[in-house]
Image (cartoon, coloured by chain):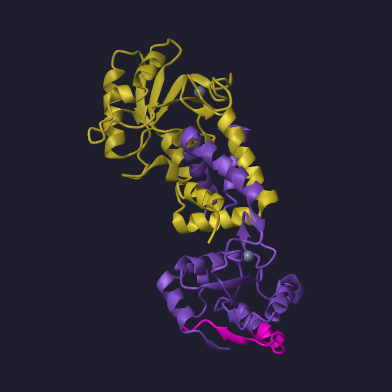
Chain colours: A yellow, B purple
Amino acid sequence: MSSSEIDRLIQLLAKLPGLGPRSARRAALHLIKRRESLLSPLADAMHEAADAIKTCSVCGNLDTRDPCSVCADPRRDGALVCVVEEVGDLWALERTGSFKGLYHVLGGTLSALEGIGPDDLNVSGLINRARRPEVTEVILAMNATVEGQTTAHYITDRLADCDVTVSRLAHGVPVGGELDYLDDGTLTAALRSRRPF
Amino acid sequence: MSSSEIDRLIQLLAKLPGLGPRSARRAALHLIKRRESLLSPLADAMHEAADAIKTCSVCGNLDTRDPCSVCADPRRDGALVCVVEEVGDLWALERTGSFKGLYHVLGGTLSALEGIGPDDLNVSGLINRARRPEVTEVILAMNATVEGQTTAHYITDRLADCDVTVSRLAHGVPVGGELDYLDDGTLTAALRSRRPF
Ligand SMILES: [Zn+2]
Ligand SMILES: [Zn+2]
């Protein structure tokens, strides 16, 4: 039916979230028919991203610069550090345009079931940042899931001897909901009415 | 929030069928986090496909060879030519493994609304093929849509002075349905019970 080049393209496209085997086939065909206008530019963009994107050594964001453009921006308020599970959550909060502090990406949540402990997350990096004198508040913006809230409690305990206020996002985040699926308005409201943890 | 490299990647991914702006963002993040295992291999596969895939000059299939591997296969029955709208339909029929003839890809359907006439489709190529002495049957496998059936009638008229039987897929293809969405069993049954047009 099709060459090994097409099969391989379909196989790799099927690994993208949101694309099953059938939609991967459609996507491959769509790409091959638009070789000049889409397939080659997308391949180039992927190579450029693969070469250029680094993990920020300060906050864990993904960017072409390290420190990332958030950490390097002198207009951001270094007194506030907002802790998120994943880079996608950081991006979701940035899209609201309503937070002017810095971030810290944990890289997941604690999970006994999956064997993910504190050393598998970037917790020690957070504690070190929270000890710096300019940091006055740590906002816990984990998902409103059991794992997210367990992780938030653990981090609150670990921050106990740091001289910072610990707050969390206001209710407004639906129970069981994930940040990256929320609309900007809900996220903005949740940020504004954050309260002590 | 993110670099121009990431923005460009998201923008291009959003042009894939099945991915909106939000799922394109998720796909980009998924890719960037899997630089070695997915992002670079996918970029390579795209470049290889862009370089290697050609349109078959005989049937319109997409393949690394011209004539394509279907047209070049001596075991295929050159007496049967199955006419489809798009390459995706050819692939769908090939996946059933139940058709051993050759194909002809029209490249679309007639559409007064969209200003698509016979010269915009590969109709003359089909007529030339149908005139060759070895061709005895032309199977019209257009979608069961108004445009597909209008196109099938037009082609039947054009084939009137060629010495071929014209048949169509059996009912079994749901009215309004598109070939590429059907399961293999339905397609196989529809092919087996094809009847004179
Ligand atoms: Zn950073
Ligand atoms: Zn061919």
Count up the numbered dots.
0
Instruction: Identify the residue at the far left of this view.
Output: A112
Please indicate whether residue A168 sits to the left or right of residue B155 in the image. left
Name the quarter where the C terminus of chain A is drawn.
top left
Residue B37 coordinates in the image, percent (x, y): 46, 36
> Is A170 or B60 nearer to us in this picture?
B60
Residue B9 coordinates in the image, percent (x, y): 59, 40
* Residue shown at 59% from the left, 72% from the top: B102
* Residue shown at 66% from the left, 54% from the top: A34
Please indicate whether residue A152 sits to the left or right of residue B188 in the image. left
> Is A20 or B157 nearer to us in this picture?
B157
Which of the 4 image quarters holds residue B156? Answer: bottom right
Please indicate whether residue A120 sits to the left or right of residue A30 in the image. left
> Is A44 or A131 nearer to us in this picture?
A44
Residue B78 coordinates in the image, percent (x, y): 60, 75
Residue B133 coordinates in the image, percent (x, y): 68, 82
Magenta region includes residue A92: no
> Is B172 or A159 nearer to us in this picture?
B172
Rendered position, B39 above or below B23: above
Magenta residue span: B153-172
Q: Where's ligand 2: which quadrant?
A: bottom right
Magenta region includes residue B167: yes
